[in-house]
Image: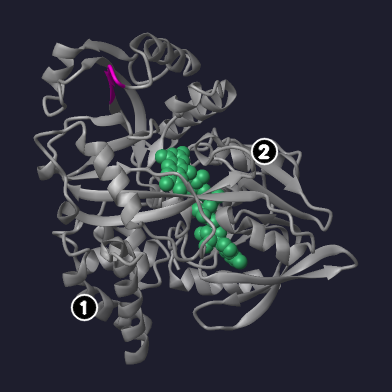
């Protein structure tokens, strides 16, 4: 095994190590929060293990709007600390992962019928630059309607007052999470995907071990640790209930969906921040040859492992978008794919979901479990630091330790080769067909047939490497087919 290897062989060795070591810290959950904590702990010199029940980033961390941002809209609720913290983290991340975090120009047009006045937004723009300590890519620019239409001609001129151009960043969330996972291993952490926490073991009333299952082999085993960190995002309540008999609801999951369609249908030159029919803001972001449209924000009480866009969600976004582009109406038949995810928001029962705080919180349970809830992709590093500061008095080193860009930034569909696949298997702990199609690449989201035409070859090649039986091969293909069905389920009128 080479040093940079992060493969099924690495995973096999890691599982043996997870069984036989008494860990300083065991992290449960391999989303961006969990892998961030594993890296932070390892860089402090602690012995840290991490388990993820599915694939790295298979939860919310591959379902976001993919923005590394301060969150301009939170200024309206005067969440200055949150915005300041996120803008500082944006700056750190740009420096640490320039191959994965790119500057994004965002246009915010202001219309007369909208709820934000030109003056108020102008003040917000200055505040946004100020909270970034004027260290953004560039300062915002102000446009009157005529000049704004010159740079974004497809927007409707009707009642347009003008607008603003400002800068945030864009990142492929799943690949960023993977980069952090790989860097955590480089720093000394031991990680495994497809290992699920089943329950905890206690000595007296304190946790002493996690009983887990290797989801691929069904083998169960226990992992001993001094500290157990619950970094399971939307699943935090469930994991906490495995440790504690109290039925405390720490997280209030809210659903957000996105749609993807070809940029030929809407030739925009910038990402746009627009006001929806209900006055919430939403984004349309050019993403290569595609546009990414999102998002919604609705309370969710369904199955956490099966979240999908409904017809109402899709119509809400299309109706909101089409008001701005009368000559480029997007119809349901234009949509290539959809995805839906759950925000693990801190429980604030009285608030409408759109206004629930995006801050994070750390809960020390009497049984010794530590839960980290809330937060954003952008602030994962600070969240990890805050958790580890409660466990270790050694200094945090994550802001000063850049990632070595071990993982590739993009993998092209048209030219995807056997060598590319072997790279993913050997360097990115890729174990299933869904891993390849949905998280290591964007084939699921962006290719016209959601990658179906490549599935037979990729699955066959993987079956040779992993010695899959024909039954397992069929299961892999139908598991991917199922994900496509979920992504297209909104087309079915019965939901
Ligand atoms: C629609 C939407 C848009 C968003 N847009 C942005 C954005 O543009 N910018 C931004 O900064 N933030 C954004 N966010 C927020 C951000 O995506 C989340 O805050 C972040 O991804 C949460 O990461 P996490 O690691 O806490 O949770 P997750 O990514 O959900 O990870 C939790 C992991 O725990 C695992 N797990 C659960 N139970 C177990 C178990 N029993 N054993 C082992 N593992 C288990 C799950 O499989 C999962 O992978 C958005 C969120 C949503 C929903």
Q: Residue at x 54, y 34 (%)?
A: 399
Q: Relative to the observer, which residue lies in front, 157 or 285? A: 157
Q: Is residue 484 depicted above or below 268 in this figure?
A: below
Badge number at residue 386: 2
Q: Relative to the observer, which residue lies in front, 60 or 96? A: 60
Label 2 vs 1, first from the N-terminus: 2
Point out the stretch of residues depicted in magenta: 107-113
Residue, disc 1: 456
Q: Is residue 456 depicted above or below 172 in this figure?
A: below
Q: Quadrant of residue 483?
A: bottom left
The quarter of the picture where the C terminus appears is: bottom left
Q: Residue at x 18, y 17 (%)?
A: 148
Q: Is residue 357 visible?
A: yes
At mark 2, the secondary structure is helix
The quarter of the picture where the N terminus appears is: bottom left
Q: Residue furthest right?
A: 204
């Amino acid at each position: 095994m080479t040093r940079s290897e992060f493969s099924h062989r690495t995973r096999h060795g890691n599982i043996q190590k997870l069984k036989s070591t008494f860990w300083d810290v065991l992290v449960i959950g391999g989303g961006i929060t969990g892998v961030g904590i594993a890296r932070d702990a390892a860089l402090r010199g602690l012995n840290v293990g991490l388990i993820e029940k599915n694939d790295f980033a298979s939860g919310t961390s591959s379902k976001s709007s993919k923005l590394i941002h301060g969150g301009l809209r939170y200024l309206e609720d005067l969440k200055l600390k949150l915005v300041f913290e996120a803008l500082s983290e944006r700056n750190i991340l740009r420096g640490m992962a320039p191959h994965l975090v790119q500057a994004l120009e965002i246009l915010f047009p202001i219309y007369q019928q909208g709820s934000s006045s030109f003056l108020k937004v102008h003040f917000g723009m200055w505040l946004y630059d100020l909270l970034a300590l004027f260290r953004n890519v560039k300062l915002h620019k102000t446009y009157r309607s005529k000049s704004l239409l010159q740079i974004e001609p497809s927007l409707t001129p009707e009642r347009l007052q003008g607008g603003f151009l400002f800068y945030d960043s864009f990142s492929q969330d799943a690949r960023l999470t993977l980069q952090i996972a790989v860097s955590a291993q480089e720093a000394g952490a031991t990680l495994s995907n497809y290992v699920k926490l089943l329950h905890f073991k206690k000595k007296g009333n304190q946790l002493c071990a996690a009983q887990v299952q290797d989801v691929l082999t069904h083998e169960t085993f226990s992992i001993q640790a001094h500290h157990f960190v619950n970094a399971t995002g939307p699943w935090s309540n469930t994991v906490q209930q495995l440790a504690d008999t109290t039925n405390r609801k720490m997280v209030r999951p809210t659903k957000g969906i996105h749609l993807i369609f070809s940029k030929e249908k809407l030739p925009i030159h910038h990402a746009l921040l627009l006001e929806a029919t209900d006055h919430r803001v939403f984004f349309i972001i050019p993403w290569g040859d595609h546009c990414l449209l999102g998002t919604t924000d609705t309370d969710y009480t369904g199955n956490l492992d099966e979240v999908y866009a409904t017809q109402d969600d899709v119509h809400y976004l299309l109706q909101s978008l089409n008001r701005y582009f009368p000559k480029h109406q997007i119809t349901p038949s234009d949509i290539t794919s959809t995805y839906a995810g759950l925000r693990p928001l801190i429980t604030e029962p009285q608030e409408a979901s759109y206004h629930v705080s995006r801050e994070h919180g750390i809960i020390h349970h009497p049984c010794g479990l530590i839960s980290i809830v809330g937060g954003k992709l952008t602030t994962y590093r600070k969240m990890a630091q805050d958790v580890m500061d409660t466990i270790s008095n050694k200094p945090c080193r994550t802001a000063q330790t850049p990632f070595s860009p071990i993982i590739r930034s993009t993998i092209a569909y048209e030219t995807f080769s056997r060598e590319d696949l072997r790279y993913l298997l050997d360097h990115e702990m890729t174990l299933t067909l869904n891993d390849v199609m949905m998280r290591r690449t964007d084939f699921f989201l962006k290719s016209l047939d959601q990658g179906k035409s490549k599935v037979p070859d990729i699955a066959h090649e993987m079956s040779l490497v992993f010695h899959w039986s024909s039954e397992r091969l069929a299961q892999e293909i139908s598991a991917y087919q199922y994900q496509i069905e979920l992504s297209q389920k909104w087309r079915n009128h019965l939901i």
